[in-house]
Image (cartoon, rainbow, N blue to C red):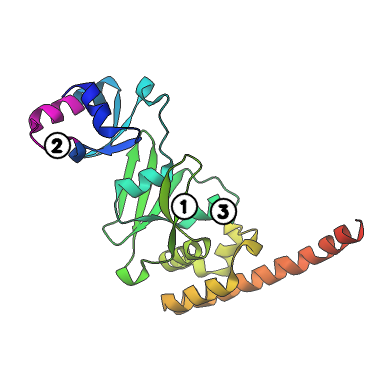
Amino acid sequence: MKWTELLSAVGTEPLFESGLLLVGDVDRADVTRQLSRWVASGKLVQLRRGLYAFGGSEARGRRAPAPYEIANRLVPGSYVSLSSVLARTGLIPEYVPVTTSITTGRPARYVTPLGTFVYRHVKPSMFWGFETLGLESGGRAFAAVPEKALIDLLYLDHEATDSAYLVQLRIQNLDRLQLDVLEKMAHRCGVERVRRAALRIARMAADEQESYAPWKAAKEASR
C-alpha cells in the first residue's frame, strides 16, 4: 500500500480503523507492514490495535481529534462521563487531564501519545443519560449530560456520597444543574446512597442560591 492510497481511503477524517484499508482485494500483510512502518516513522500514531491518528507534519492542516472523539473510538459503545464532563461544564473547578468514560464492557486504561483514557464499568441498566455533543474541534462524541455524570460519580465511587467528599470535590455553579432531572436519575439508579447524595446536592444548590441572592439584589438595584 502507498501513502497516497491511504490518504484517499481515509479522506479528511482525523482517526481511522485499519479495517477500512482491508476491504476488497488487498494484500493484508502489506497493509499491516506499511502501517507499522508509518508508525515507526512518526507519520501515524497508533492509539490501540487497529486504531490510528495522523502524526507529526502529516497532522498539519487536518482537523485534530478531540479527546472525547478519541475516547469514543478507543472503546466503541462508551460515553464520556464523570469528572471529565463535570470539569467541562464548570461543575468542578479542576482541570482533568484524564478522559474518563462509561462502558458496559471491561474496565480499561489506555495511555496514548494523544492522552490518557480510562473506562469504568457499569451494568447495562445504568447505561443511559448521554447525548451526542458537537465539539469545538468540529467532531461529535457521546457524553453524559451533566446530571448523569454526577450520578455516575455517586454510583461508582462509594465515598462520593459522603458529605465531606462532596465538599472536597468543590462542586460549583449548581444553578447549571437541572435538579428535578438529577432527582429522577437518582431514583432510576435505584441505589439509596445515590438518592441521599442527590438530595444533599439539591440542598447545596439551595444554599448557593440563597447566598447569591443578596449580591444579585444589590446588582439589580444599582442599575
Apparent side of residue 36 relative to residue 222 in the rendered image (left or right): left
List x then y, in percent, for residue 56: 37, 22
**Element type where label 3 sits in the image:** loop
Q: Callout 2, which amino acid?
A: Leu
Q: Whole-percent x and y of residue 161?
A: 51, 69
> Residue 172: which quarter of the image?
bottom right
Q: Is residue 1 above or below residue 91?
A: above
Residue at (54% x, 51% y) in the render: 87
Q: Tell me the residue that label 3 is attached to.
A: 89
Q: Which mark is residue 13?
A: none
Residue type, mark 1 in image: Leu
Specify which label sits upstream in the sequence, 2 or 1. Answer: 2
Q: CA distance from mark 2 to mark 3?
A: 40 Å
Residue 200 location (% of width, % of height): 59, 73
Mark 3 Cα within 10 Å, few/some/many (few <14, many 20+)?
some
- Of residue 123 and residue 69, the one placed in the foreground of this image is 69
Q: How far apart are the alpha carbons under marks 2 and 1?
A: 30 Å
**Is the residue marked by circle 1 packed among few (<14), some (14-19), or many (20+) residues within 10 Å?**
some
Q: Which mark is residue 133?
A: 1
The magenta stretch spans which residues? Answer: 21-35
Does residue 31 belong to the magenta stretch?
yes
Residue located 76% across and 69% down the image = 210
Which quarter of the image is occupied by the N terminus? top left
Q: Amino acid at mark 3?
A: Thr
Asked whether 23 falls inside the magenta stretch, the response is yes
Q: Which residue is mark 2?
A: 22
